[in-house]
Amino acid sequence: MMDRAFGRSLLLCVSLAAAAVLGTVLKPHDSLAAGLPPVDLEHMVPAAFADWKVEAVRSAVVTDDVQAEIDKVYSQVLDRVYVNPAGQRVMLSVAYGSDQRTGTQLHRPEFCYEAQGFQVSATEDSRLSTGFGEIPVRRMVATNGARVESVTYWITVGSHATLPGIGRKLEQLAYGLSGHVPDGMVVRVSTLSQDVSGNEAYRLQARFVRDLSSALTGPARSRLTGGADL
Amino acid sequence: MRAILHHVYQSVRFKPAWPMFALLMGVTYLPTVVVLSRTEWQSDEGSYGPLILLATLFVIWVKRSRLTDASTRSACGAGALLLALGLLSYVLGRSQNIVQLNVGSALAVLAGGVLILGGWPSLRLMSFPILYLFFCIPLPGVLLTAMTETLKVLASSAAEQSLWSMGYPVARTGVMLMVGPYQLLVADACSGLHSLISLAALGLLYLHLVGKRGRIRQALMIAAVVPVALAANVVRIDVLAMITFRWGAEAGEGFLHEAAGLVVFAVALGLFVALDRLLACEWLPRVRRAA
């Protein structure tokens, strides 16, 4: 009787100690980003492709709080406005983070817009063809006074395109449990309602993404739109 | 002789189980505490964390002498299950950096360990401190954002109405209050989420440690925690708006901002205790008897 009780407490202690060791040993150490050519968004994304040209390098106005937050999670940020001969403008924003584990992951654009005083509405998930495969995208309308912005975005974890939420969690876990620290991006394409509105905006954005995908080099494309679906 | 031997055997060989369990819990969860102290506990929303942990340890320490050493077969089975579940989430949470799993696993591991070593009576004894650790689990970002936004809007509209009824020239757009010539932004930190959680945690600790209550009184007190905390936050915003209105914007920021928060928190706790005393009064049952 006594020995059984002793055995139990021994088993309890051993399993606790084992968990403590496993928890540390199973931490992913391999940075995925370190094994790949370094990401340089400025060079990866061409300044002109199809009939799109960079109009101006956009410098968005952000508060100090937001800037501090940006520096904390993003390794690189690219912000550009492209314009086509018809005068339609498409804003492209790519944020890259080299450590996409939970806790240091990139933020959802929803929150970034809301944090800057936008109201986010009409959020819906859809799929978008890049011409090289389909990727899951989220669409939403961000409104701040007279500024109405239609947004399409997706995120990547490692070489997989996905969306925030359970999809991202599972990708993070899959990479983490195989010992890798994934990198990732948030790719955001948006238009203002004074240029195009409603479904027309999303069609224009889809065309922009297709044009962009075919203009990218292979490695750049798999970084920006995910490699698994290609 | 046999009885004495038995006693010696029990005190020497078996008693170390509890301290060993406590020690190993400490070793296993020390890294978790380190992670928390570098992240969540540094932020406004999570700064109450260390106090929760201390309170939990204190309550466990107070009750330790009443732990029993007898575990039944059914308790062992359930304990092993809880332990396995807890350790699995611990390994996953710790290695994959998912802090909610990491911290939350402590509840299951503690409950499992207590069941294995001490059986159901011991788990019943320790149920409060174990469940109390729930407050230590950081809110996931999505939930935190949603709750903060909701509470902010709630607090600013309540502050607007109460200030208006006191005759202040007040107007509100969203979470921006205009009091006379001054603009006050009800920031994330003013949402009251922090004081709501801290007050709920302190209130429950008080209810557990102080006094014996009937079931109805206990339920009433638990139900009172949230309204008292919300009201306290509205009073805080009101007071800051009044200070700003009387003495200018500088007065409403700086030192008084912090001080008002602390004072109102203390007042809310006082109110809570007063309500408890009031419910304990003799006249309550007598009223019921008279009716």
Image: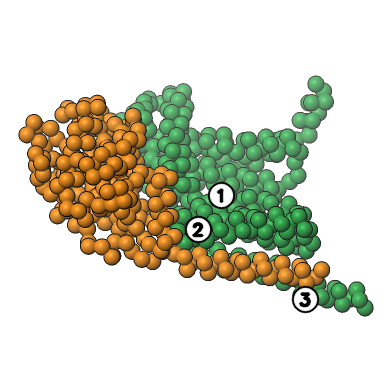
For the colour green, the matching chain is B
- Answer whether residue B47 is visible to the viewer in this image: no
**Residue depicted at x 50% and y 52%:** B100
Label 3 sits on residue: B12
Residue B219 picture quarter: top right
Near-viewer residue (A77 or A153): A153
Q: Could you tell me which secondary element the residue under label 3 belongs to?
A: helix
**Amino acid on which the number 3 mark rests in the picture:** Val
Spot occupied by residue A49 in the image (x, y as percentages of width and height): 11, 44
First in sequence, mark 1 or 3: give its number: 3
The kind of residue on which mark 1 rests is Phe
What numbered label is drawn on residue B92? 2
Position of residue B217 in the picture relative to residue B228 (left or right): right
* Vertical comparison of B140 with A143: above or below: below
Q: Are marks 2 and 1 on the same chain?
A: yes
| Image coords of residue B258 (percent x, y) | 44, 47
Q: Position of residue A86 (x, y in %)?
A: 8, 31
Nearer the observer: mark 2 or 1; the answer is 2
Circle 1 residue? B135
Q: The orange chain is which one?
A: A
Residue ranking furthest to the left: A85
For mark 2, give the secondary structure: helix
In the drawing, does residue B84 fall left or right of residue B291? left
